[in-house]
Amino acid sequence: MSEQRQTNPLPIGRYWVDVSDTPKAPTLVDDFGAWADSNTSKVHVETTEETPAEHGNPRRLFAIFSVSAPVFFPAANFGFPNDAPPNVHSEQDVFGAPPPDPPGLQLPSFGDLAGVLPLLLILAVVLAAGNSRRRSEAWG
């Protein structure tokens, strides 16, 4: 769905990033907010979704932001952001849908096989009849 941007400074564009606090860096979510606040002339945060720390899971922040002029992004802290296409408006748009199947690896559905099944049945009957005839000729 989106491509990770691995250039610094970040070029003009729209991005999403998923940031989690860690035991070694317990303030990463706040640090992202501080980075965005210190770059308001170049960075506009469109939306954020924060998940509090609970049940042993760290605090997380999903953010969509746009860059109006090249800006340094502290990827060593947050990882590189991903390109956010126009249809991405929330975390659900990124993580909610299963990834599409790669071309050529899709299994046919039963509906696809329904039209082929009668032909396969006829082929099986013909092959079975041919095998029966060969066996009877070999014995006969």
Image (cartoon, helix red, strand yellow):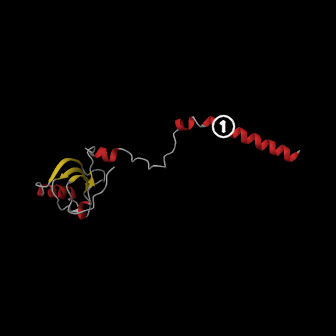
Residue at image position (18%, 56%) is: 30
Residue under the image location 87 percent in, 46 percent down = 139
Which amino acid, by three-letter code, is at mark 1? Leu
Q: Is residue 29 left or right of residue 105?
A: left
- Residue for point 10% across, 55% down: 41
Quick one: 22 or 9, which is closer to the camera? Answer: 9
Q: Position of residue 61 (x, y in %)?
A: 24, 51
Crowding around mark 1 (Cα neighbors within 10 Å: few <14, some 14 to 19, many 20+) is few
Which quadrant is the C terminus positioned in? top right
Q: Secondary structure at mark 1?
A: helix
Among the 4 quarters of the image, the one containing residue 26: bottom left
Q: Depth check: 25 or 13 in front?
A: 13
- How many numbered discs? 1
Across and down, in percent, residue 65 comes to: 20, 51
Residue 10 drawn at (x, y percent): 21, 59
- The vertical placement of 98 against 21, above or below, is above
| Disc 1 target residue | 121
Q: Is residue 75 left or right of residue 104?
A: left
127 vs 5, left or right, is: right
Q: Where is residue 7, by image quadrant?
A: bottom left
Give the percent coordinates (x, y) of residue 69.
15, 56
Residue reaching furthest to the right: 140
